[in-house]
Structures are given as structure tokens and as C-alpha cells.
Image (cartoon, coloured by chain):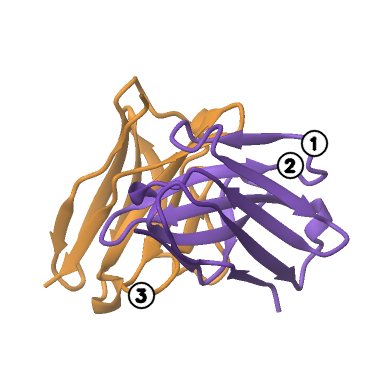
Chain colours: A orange, B purple
Amino acid sequence: QTVVTQEPSLSVSPGGTVTLTCGLNSGSVSTNNYPSWYQQTPGQPPRTLISTTNTRSSGVPDRFSGSILGNKAALTITGAQADDESDYYCMLSMGSGIFVFGTGTKVIVL
Amino acid sequence: EVQLVESGGGLVQPGGSLRLSCAASGFTFSNSWMTWVRQAPGRGLEWMALIKPDGSGTAYVDSVKGRFTISRDNAENSLYLQMNSLRAEDTALYYCGRFGLAYAMDVWGQGTTVAVS
């Protein structure tokens, strides 16, 4: 069974930088998994931040960036702001039309 | 305005059935890959099912394969999820979504709640 793992929780100071990762229990994440990233605040549907590893969606601030770091996908928030405090999910394409979300990371800004 | 509006959620007994609908507007539905995602209370997102623009192909997560069926009516700009043999663990908020060109969801509905009890 495919499991996509993320850090359960990360803290960042206002103005600081934090990197969230997205890994696969079965091997490495690559651009062929078309990693995407989503932000969700309580009571709201997710908001799409990043597609195909590093393409920001329209209206997403450039403090959000995506990449591949080693064998994982990564989302970096540079210059964190209070309203970045949210849950963040990655999603990977596993081929044949199958997708898997990561376990999610709660980002705390304090 | 690009919009997805889900409906059809509710309370159902274990073993029962429910059909969710998703009304699309503001974009060319017939050209769009569509999907269902769910979120159990206090839990993370779970991708469930995908359908091609013309409905000719579908894909499912293993946990719903054989029980749930995704379908669409392009003339009505509508997406559906037929859910049979429902279990307590299917209790969740169900979102419909559009896949953009880049293997990522780019439009989300507000969700409809399904409770199996």
C-alpha cells in the first residue's frame, strides 16, 4: 500500500522559513509524480498552492515555492506570515489515474 | 465564476446507498478531468476517484473500488458519485474537484457531508 508521509507538525517564527516534505514509503518522489501542494484552514475547502512540483497557482504569494529535495517533494515558505498557519497536504500521481494525498502537516506560526 | 457545488449528502445506515452530485459552472465541464476527494472528521484528505472528460475512463482508490462509482453527464454539467455498501468509515466531507492541466486539482467545491450510522 502506498503511503505518502509528511511531518505531522512544524513551527516557524513570523518572517522565518520552513520546509515541508512529502515522501513515499515505496521509494523516491520525482517530477514524474507531479507533486502538488494544498493549504487548508479549518472549515474551508483546500486551496491549491503548487502544481507539477514548482508551479504556483494564480494568486499564490511567491513566498511559497515547491521543489524536489533529495528523494522527497518539498514546499518552502519563506518569510512566514501569521495567516500561513494552516494544514498543508501534498498529492502525488502514482500513474494509471491514481493519486494519493500525503498525511498532512500542521504549520504553526509563533 | 468557476464554481462546483456538491449536494446529496446525508445520514444513511451501514450497508445503505447514497448518490452525490456536483454541479459545475463557469468553465467547459466537458473538457475537464473531474475527481472526488473526502475528508473524515478531524482527518486528512483522501483522493477517491477520477473520471476522464468524456467519461470513458475512471480510476479509484482501493478502499472504494467495487462499492463506489464515479460518473458524469456533460450535457448537464454534472458529476456524480454513487456510493453503495456504505460503512461507518465512509463518514466524511466529500469534495468534488476539477483537475487542471498539470495533474493537480485547481477548483474545489465546498463539500457535502455523509454520515454512516
Looking at the image, do the residues carrying marks 2 and 1 touch, with CB atoms under 8 Å apart?
Answer: yes
Dot 1 amino acid type: Ser
In the image, A21 versus B116, the foreground residue is B116
- Judging by the rendered image, the residue that carries numbered circle 1 is B56
Q: Tag 2, which chain?
A: B
Taking A87 as reference, is A48 left or right?
right
Q: Which residue lies furthest to the top in this view?
A: A27
In the image, A2 versus B80, the foreground residue is B80
Which residue is located at x 61 percent, y 26 percent?
Answer: A96
Task: Give the SS element for disc 2.
Answer: loop
Task: Give the SS element for disc 3.
Answer: loop
Q: Residue A80: which disc?
A: none
Taking the image as drawn, is residue B99 in sight? Answer: no
Q: Residue B52: which disc?
A: 2
Between the residue at mark 2 and the residue at mark 1, the CA separation in whole angstroms equals 6 Å
Q: Tag 1, which chain?
A: B
Taking the image as drawn, is residue A11 in sight? Answer: yes
Task: Give the SS element for disc 1.
Answer: loop
- Judging by the rendered image, the residue that carries numbered circle 3 is A43
Dot 3 amino acid type: Gly
Place of residue A77 in the rendered image (x, y in percent of width and height, measured from the top left): 30, 60
Dot 2 amino acid type: Lys
Which residue is located at x 28 percent, y 67 percent?
Answer: A86
Q: Quadrant of the C terminus of chain B?
A: bottom left
